[in-house]
Image (cartoon, rainbow, N blue to C red):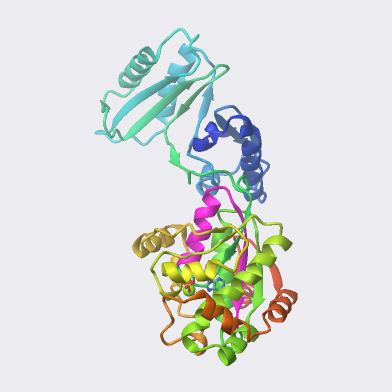
Amino acid sequence: MKQILIHYGELSTKGRNRKSFQQKMAEHIRYQTRHLEKIKILPHHDFMHLQWEETPYEDLIEILKNIPGIQRFEPVYPVERDFAVIRQAAVHLFSDLQLDSQASFKVVAKRSDKTFPYDSLAIQREVGGDILDAFPQLKVAMRQPDHKLVVSVQQDQAYLSLTSYPGMGGLPYGSSGKGLLMLSGGFDSPIAGYEMIKRGMALEMVHFASPPYTSPQALEKAKRLTGVLAQYATSLTFHEVPFTKVQLAIKDQVPDNMSMTVMRRIMLRIMDRLVIERKAHAIINGESLGQVASQTIDSMRVINQVSQSLILRPLISADKNDIIDLAQRIGSYEISNEPYEDCCTVFSPKSPWTKPRLHTILEYEERLPIQELVEEALAEIVTTEIDRHYQNPSQQAFTDLL
Ligand code: ATP
Ligand code: MG
């Protein structure tokens, strides 16, 4: 039988909510492993225990790295809680390793069950001695050993482990409510989504598209970015909001330098309605203070003013370089870097007003049938489900041919 122990991190501080947090994490693991053999999931107070038979460790490891709420996890070898058995098993484990003649090692013992007659130091000393006797070519190294054996003695069992993997940290998916992510094709919004997933928020995507001024590739880009985020979530609901009529009406009635402000305010009116319809708790966007004209502090105030919702901006203080680094790590960089724009030059103002005044914006908004435009956009939303295997239709057709 193969086994992994998962260590929770922040979740373990959650007192009486712990059960529901554990349940969310178990559900998430169950979802992401649904194509594999059935994995037994046993939640304990401080850790979660996974057991299964056939699937290679690597397959589970790749999945667990992307499950929020996990601090770290380790494949473990359970042994009887008997010192002689533990010592034998430790030597046996080392005999399975590819040991270089110069390799170094260290034994770390953790005794959470204090009734065990040997303390941590004694366990380390004895087990380390046995390993040295069996493999005299090895050296002991306290710092940066090539092999670190952890012996953990619990109430009913002892566990040996040689490797520990870092997890994503954060909180289990769906334990912090649901947010609607305003997803463009750029670098920022997918990262904003990732940050909220990490804090336990379940997401739905909202993408505003203005065909034929924006291309089908731009829409596909947003969908593929959703596929990337789905690696860290479950399958994700994607709403495509038709925005061409709004854009044309603004272009017709609003001076160029104010169009961006009005456009964002209409997006937010639509978002507010979706928050209610989708029973969400918040809107999430990728704004970062001062990054572009719509993100100056004055601009953000005037845009924000139209919304009744809680708007979360996880990247508000982030630097672009850090955002790009994270995009590379989570796998969204290549897609965001593609040239297709979600907003086209036709609707992009030459020099947007960076200090818009609310009363002037309101005057121009009166010229637009905003209520109708909002209703119409809402009525024509196209909703799809996207999972982590998402490929765009043409790619799919190509794969099917092979
Ligand atoms: P991003 O890299 O996420 O595109 P940006 O730096 O290009 O952000 P803006 O284009 O001003 O900045 O957009 C700010 C935020 O508004 C985005 O992060 C995103 O959350 C939202 N947004 C912009 N365009 C769209 C769109 N077409 N559909 C949905 N949300 C959008
Ligand atoms: Mg953008």
Find the residue positioned furthest to the bottom: 252
Q: Residue furthest front?
A: 359
The correct choice, above or below, for 195 with respect to 277 in the image is above
Task: In this rendered view, identify the residue nearer to me: 36 or 210.
Answer: 210
Which quarter of the figure has residue 182? bottom right
| Foreground pick, 164 / 371 | 371
Q: Position of residue 188 (x, y in %)?
A: 46, 66
Looking at the picture, how far across and down is residue 156, in whole percent? 58, 17
Q: Which residues are magenta?
A: 188-210
Residue 370, x across and y down, in percent: 67, 80
Which residue is painted at 35% across and 24% down in the image?
107
Query: In the picture, which quadrant includes the C terminus?
Result: bottom right
Please state, as top left, top right, bottom left or bottom right, where the N terminus lies in the image. top right
Q: Is residue 85 left or right of residue 120?
A: right
Counting the numbered discs, the total is 0
Where does residue 116 sit, x and y in percent of width and height? 48, 10
Residue at horizontal 55 percent and vertical 31 percent from the top: 47
Image quadrant where residue 401 sits: bottom right
Position of 184 relative to 279 (above/below): below
Residue 208 lies in the magenta stretch: yes
Going by the image, does 246 lie left or right of 114?
right
In the displayed structure image, the side of residue 386 where residue 251 appears, left or right: left
Q: Is residue 266 visible?
A: yes
Can residue 343 be seen?
no
Q: Is residue 115 magenta?
A: no
